[in-house]
Amino acid sequence: MKIPDDLVLVGHIAGAYGLQGWVKIQPYSAEADALLHAKTWWLDKPAMRDVERMQVREHGGGIVAQLMGVADRDAAEALKGTAVRISRSHFPALADNEFYWVDLIGMAVENLQGTSLGTVGDLMDNGAHPILRVQPAAPETDGKAPETAGKAPETAGKAPEMLIPFVEQYVIAVDREARKVTVDWELDY
């Protein structure tokens, strides 16, 4: 079977669950809807392959599942550490102002004045709300070498990442087509 181009990493197998070949999945999102709804999962161990999910349910902050071809605890334990991917086309539909985190990664981030703050490198959840981790834009130069004296080579000329709360007060708009997030945030915050 051809590997889909739209696979999204959604979790990993944390180990065996019980004696009948069930596996424990550690999802990478608080909402594991994609894992619960998709019938076909893609596993990367021993090589990228599709596996039919027979049964699945939430269990203790994670997911447990029975997969086709995994008949006992030893087979389930052998999958420990395996990445689980799902085709983006199998994700549940979202309401208008909802986003999957994976869709935001790589989007340009600009403030209300049109200043580029960088790109969304990742998101994290602090318990109260998600936080955009914005990787700084490359420094603009006028053809001269940037001032790097006394700085470590890996941080020379680099601004630190910005952490912007993903709440209505700061995130003004998300334009999926333009791949841009507009925020009420300044470079010196």
Image (cartoon, grey):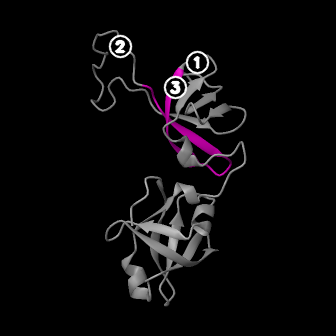
Depth check: give the residue in front, 155 or 104: 104
- Lower position in the chain sequence, tag 3 or tag 2: 3
Distance, label 3 to label 2, CA atoms, is: 16 Å
Q: Is label 1 in a helix, a strand or a loop?
A: loop
- Please tell me which of labels 1 and 2 falls first in the chain: 1
Q: Quadrant of residue 55?
A: bottom right
Amino acid type at circle 3 is: Leu
Q: Residues within 10 Å of mark 1 (few under 14, many from 20)?
A: few
Q: Is residue 89 above or below residue 67?
A: above
Q: Is residue 129 magenta?
A: yes
Instruction: Based on the picture, tell me whether residue 123 belongs to the magenta stretch.
Output: yes
The nearer-to-camera label among 1 and 2 is: 1
Q: Which residue is mark 3?
A: 117
Report how far apart the C-alphas of labels 1 and 2 lie in the structure: 19 Å
Q: Badge 2: how crowded within 10 Å, few (<14), some, or many (20+)?
A: few
Magenta stretch, overall SS:
strand
Percent position (x, y) of residue 116?
Answer: 52, 22
Q: Looking at numbered disc 1 in the image, what kind of residue is underneath it?
A: Gly
Residues at marks 3 and 2 touching, judged by CB atoms closer than 8 Å: no
Q: Is residue 109 above or below residue 79?
A: above
Residue 176 appears left or right of 143: right
Q: Is residue 112 above or below residue 161?
A: above
Residue 104: name its quadrant. Answer: top right
Residue 25, given in percent of the width and then of the height, sits at: 51, 70
What stretch of residues is rendered in magenta? 116-137
**Where does label 2 land, which residue?**
141
Residue indicated by mark 1? 114
Front of the two marks 3 and 1: 1
Residue located 39% across and 86% down the image? 74
Where residue 53 appears, as percent x and y from the top left, is 53, 75
